[in-house]
Amino acid sequence: MKLLLHRTGLFSLASGILLLFCLPAAASDKSIMDRISGADEPFDDSGIKSAYDLALKTVRAQIPYQGGTFKVLTRKDSIDRFRCSVCHTDKIPQARDSTLFTHGDIKINHGREGDGLACADCHHEKERDFLVGKKGESVDFDHSYLLCGKCHFRQLNDWVGGAHGKRVKYWAGERVVNNCATCHNPHSPRFTKRMPATYSLPLDE
Amino acid sequence: MVRRKDKEAQVKKNNVSDARTSRRSFLKGVSIAAAAGSAALVTGCIPGKDALSSEGFSLKWEEYFKKHYRLMTQEEKDQTIARLVKLAKIRHDLDIQMSSRPARENVLYGYAFNISRCEGYMDCVKACVRENNLDRKSKTQYIRIFEMEPGQLDPSTGDGKYFHEVPVDNKFYMGVQCFQCENPPCVKACPTKATWQEPDGIVVVDYDWCIGCRYCMAACPYWGRRFNWGEPEIPREEINTRQHYLGNRIRPRGKVEKCTFCVQRTREGRLPACAEACPTGARVFGNLLDPYSEIRYVLKHKKVFRMKEELGTDPKFWYFID
């Protein structure tokens, strides 16, 4: 009898040890990271109808996104006095119109201190309705990310991938993202200091 | 004037006669009082505060005997939602839309927070309060932004109640909310099974089954849950009428609530209110099971970490740096 008890005790001890070894393995099998990395089927979001009727002005981006395409918000529609060539003609402007014409409200705070950018670094001197790249190629205002990405190439990569910038309104449906200039003022791209929108009470209420 | 005096005299007389009540009439009075008391219980313990019509009362009464949300058939869900919509009409004169949309297939929601982008503007907090019908009186907030010293990664070392111009030089900001753990300790703690994890990964609360014991709040290592000490007070014009049964419907008093990744929005394909409001793009939201989603890009290409990962709660909320 004593021997039997001894044996069952040994058996339960052994099975207990076995269980102890098995448990962490079982737990790691259920880890969320495994489930995520195991999911490689593209998500079919055609069931989410609402995500497809965004009433926004967009253009298709000229950079591919993970094998597909995506859209960006237009820029031209939000520039107050576009098209630029309406004013910037060959005609010499009158002195009395100068305040209206010279963009006196624009303060450039872009680039390193003491070595900031000048207007012509981004704006095309001949084709006024376009931006200009370093090699003299004209860049459409709606695709200004192509120009921004010339210097901010890391941000451009992140933006195309989705780690920089943000999607507009929907996580599902066709990918529509903010253009660079939707969030950043191109003449002064750094976010300004301001008061927070609200405040929190102390933790130990 | 005379009449009032007469009345007072009558009341006094009645009181005197009350003083000499028999045992039988006393017991009768007690039973009536008990009935009134139970009625007060059903109407939420606030007799007189919101005068419910008889229709409102019967609706409340039926609400009191409904099942747990997960045991309801779709028909029963529709019925309780119809009742809640009617009650909102009676009590607040509001036309609300309430959804019971279940989780979508092949969806697991995940969140990433860029600590090198957040500037501490707290637009997300404001949007969250508006979206989720949070109590304005107690200033309940699901999100808390901590102002952190460089090198620190534990929010308890940060300042969670700053109110000055942001961003401050040489500080960074870290947002904390419910992390929708894949292995949620709050769910295990609940004695009434009033909180559970939905198939799309969101941990929700059935507010009508919550008994307000707050065990879940004690179990949560992230301070992710909030308690309603009173009936939420919201200006009528600010009430969000697009609601979800498990999400932002106005909670009764004495219930625990929490961030649900805006279940009323995300199940319609929209971004959560905080992600939509963020002016700096520090918040990335998406479907973890979609290899082409932004959140998967972040997990694959960025340096990410999760808070208190060693606890094994498996939160679906990552922090990352550029």
Image (cartoon, coloured by chain):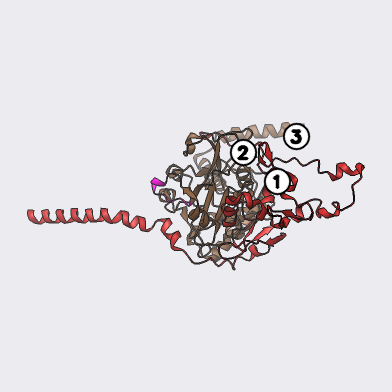
Q: Which chain is brown?
A: B
Main SS, magenta residues: loop
**Residue that badge 2 annotates:** B137
| Crowd band around label 3 with a 10 angstrom C-alpha radius: few (<14), some (14–19), many (20+) | few
Estimate the spatial distance between the alpha carbons at disc 1 and disc 2, rounded to whole Å. 37 Å
**Residue that badge 3 annotates:** B3
Residue B20: image x %, image y %? 55, 34
On the same chain, marks 3 and 2? The answer is yes
Estimate the spatial distance between the alpha carbons at disc 3 and disc 2, rounded to whole Å. 43 Å
Residue B211: image x %, image y %? 48, 47
Instruction: Name the one closer to the observer, B16 or B204.
Output: B204
Q: Nearer the viewer, mark 3 or mark 1?
A: 1
Q: Amino acid at mark 2?
A: Lys
Q: Secondary structure at mark 2?
A: loop
| Crowd band around label 1 with a 10 angstrom C-alpha radius: few (<14), some (14–19), many (20+) | some
Chain letter behind tag 3: B
**Residue that badge 1 annotates:** A185
Q: Amino acid at mark 1?
A: Asn
Q: Nearer the viewer, mark 1 or mark 2?
A: 1
Q: Secondary structure at mark 3?
A: helix
Task: Chain A: give its colour.
Answer: red
Instruction: Name the one closer to the observer, A45 or B37.
Output: A45
Q: Which residues are magenta?
A: B309-316
Up-down: is B290 above or below B305? below
| Crowd band around label 2 with a 10 angstrom C-alpha radius: few (<14), some (14–19), many (20+) | few
The reply to whether discs 3 and 1 touch (Cβ–Cβ < 8 Å) is no
Estimate the spatial distance between the alpha carbons at disc 3 and disc 1, rounded to whole Å. 75 Å
